[in-house]
Image (cartoon, grey):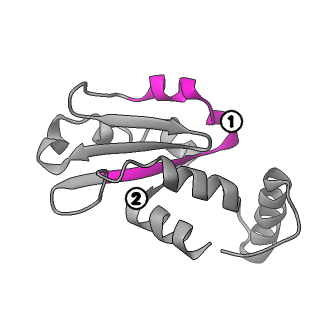
Amino acid sequence: MFETQRTDTNKLSQHIEKALKKEFGFDIPVIVRDKRNILNLAKSIPSSWTNDSMHKTDVLFLWNSYDNKKTVSLLSITPQIDNLIYVRGAIIWSLKKKNYAKSGIHKLIGTLLYKHMTVRNVNTVRKLASLM
């Protein structure tokens, strides 16, 4: 987390990516989300969607080129098992751990979409929101 007067998250991402490439010598994709987006995202997560011994809930932060409701259609979803919500900038995916093998979430890894997102568990997103 950091503070800046800059409001254009796309330009800020590009600036950070350029600095990382200069420092490390290779491209590192960056997603920047502002306070309003993180707070809205955290507020949109149902309180029953947790990451604990019985449930798995992840937040899929989307690259701008995939940030739209149609992206959900690219996912392999198992009805009655997978619960998804699209919120600007992310998809929230929740399921019961006992149903993991039946879920489509494990099919996500290795897809083109997976290369255009970063995934964090719901506890991380809630913690970030609480720190803002």
Q: Residue 2: where, in percent of width, then height? A: 72, 76
Question: Which residue occupies the extreme left position in the image?
Answer: 98
Closer to viewer: mark 2 or mark 1: 2
Q: Which range of residues does the magenta coloring cover? A: 57-75
Does residue 112 appear to the left or right of 94 in the view shown?
right
Residue 99, picture quadrant = top left
Does residue 123 appear to the left or right of 113 in the view shown?
left
**What residue lies at 35% left-to-right and 28% top-to-bottom?**
76
**Residue carrying label 1:** 65
| Local secondary structure at mark 2 | helix
Which amino acid is tagged 2? Val
Q: Give the mark nearer the N terminus: 2 vs 1.
A: 1
Compare residues 118 and 46 and report the one nearer the observer. 46
Which amino acid is tagged 1? Ser
Q: Is residue 114 visible?
A: yes
Residue 52, picture quadrant = bottom left
Q: Residue 15: where, in percent of width, then height? A: 84, 63
Residue 30 on the magenta span: no
**What residue lies at 76% left-to-right and 67% top-to-bottom?**
21
Q: Residue 95: where, in percent of width, then height? A: 25, 43
Cα separation between marks 2 and 1: 23 Å
Q: Is residue 28 visible?
A: no
| Local secondary structure at mark 1 | helix
Q: Is residue 94 above or below residue 39?
A: above
**Residue carrying label 2:** 122
**Which part of the image, by quadrant, shows the C terminus?**
bottom right
Does residue 71 appear to the left or right of 96 in the view shown?
right
Residue 68 on the magenta span: yes
**What residue lies at 61% left-to-right and 44% top-to-bottom?**
89
